[in-house]
Amino acid sequence: MNWVWQNQGTIFNEDKTTCTLDQPAAVEAFQFLQDLVIKHKVAASASDLADQEESDMFLGGRMAMFFAVRGNLGATCKAKFRFDAAVSPMGKVHMTTTAVGPSVLWNGSKNKDAAFKLMNFISSPDGERLKIKDTGFAFPSIKSLTEEPWFKSFQCGKATGTGINPAFSTEIANDWVRTFPLHPKWPEIDQEITKQIDSLFLGEKPAPQIAKEITAAVNGIIAKQ
């Protein structure tokens, strides 16, 4: 959805009762994506991605760049070539997708107090430093940690410099990130969108038709009791 959001499009209306992926901004973004694959041949197609994830293609030298959250650095730091990270390309506005990795406690635990104590530590500055400081996994949930020297000067494998972390914090600081919308039927909706996007990348249908079919399918999911 990066390109839809960068083109000032939306997935739903404000109260999330109607899908809006058939609106001009979203259709234009879908057309742009399809052209990158089918017309200009500068982006991976659905068939290219059938056997390998984008990150694996990048590490294997088959893809020049890809969208990723900071947590991907754990694998990317192992690259055998020089690389770097940058803020996402700008469309009409800056916007990209981020992910949230919540930590939860099972309500059926027999050791709730001990589990809560552990969770408290994991979520503390010391706990986050332990988890993140020397790895490429996760992004600090405590803003002050992004200002500490270890974060600003993080060295990731053969990265070209020590500015790789600020690329991610810059996007967050400027509110250039968005998570997928909270919707009770989001897993089903996401599955439907992904299925249709494969057709977009394969060039099986025109972008406007795909946008229309996605919208109809998502509205059907929303309408189901």
Image: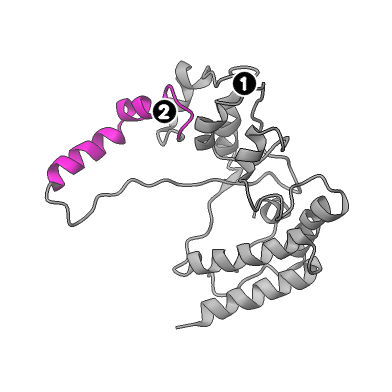
Residue shown at the point (69%, 61%) measured from the top left: 198
Report the span colored magenta.
112-137
Q: Is residue 136 magenta?
A: yes
Q: Position of residue 135 (x, y in %)?
A: 45, 26
Residue bearing mark 2: 132
Residue furthest toward the front? Answer: 51
Query: Does 92 appear above or below 19?
Result: above
Q: CA distance from mark 2 to mark 1?
A: 17 Å
Secondary structure mostly taken by the magenta-highlighted segment of the chain: helix
Instruction: Assign a secondary structure to mark 1.
Output: loop
State the residue in front, 187 or 163. 187
- Indicate the amino acid at tag 1: Ala
Q: Amino acid at mark 2?
A: Ile
Camera-near label (2 vs 1) is 1
Give the mark nearer the N terminus: 2 vs 1: 2
For the N terminus, the image quarter is: bottom right
Q: In the rendered view, would you say 106 is above or below 79?
A: below
Residue 63 place in picture, x, y as percent: 72, 38
Q: Residue at x 54, y 18 (%)?
A: 155
Which residue is more in the foreground, 211 or 195?
195
Q: Mark 1 = which residue? A: 159
Which is nearer the eye, 106 or 171?
Answer: 106
Would you say the residues marked 2 and 1 are in contact, meaning their CB atoms lie under 8 Å apart? no
Whole-percent x, y for residue 102 in the image: 37, 47
> Could you tell me which residue is drawn at 33 percent across and 28 percent down?
125
Please state if 52 lies on the left or on the right of 48 as rendered: left
Asked whether the viewer can see residue 87, the reply is no
- Residue sitting farthest toward the right: 39
| Count of picture labels | 2
Q: Quadrant of the C terminus?
A: bottom left
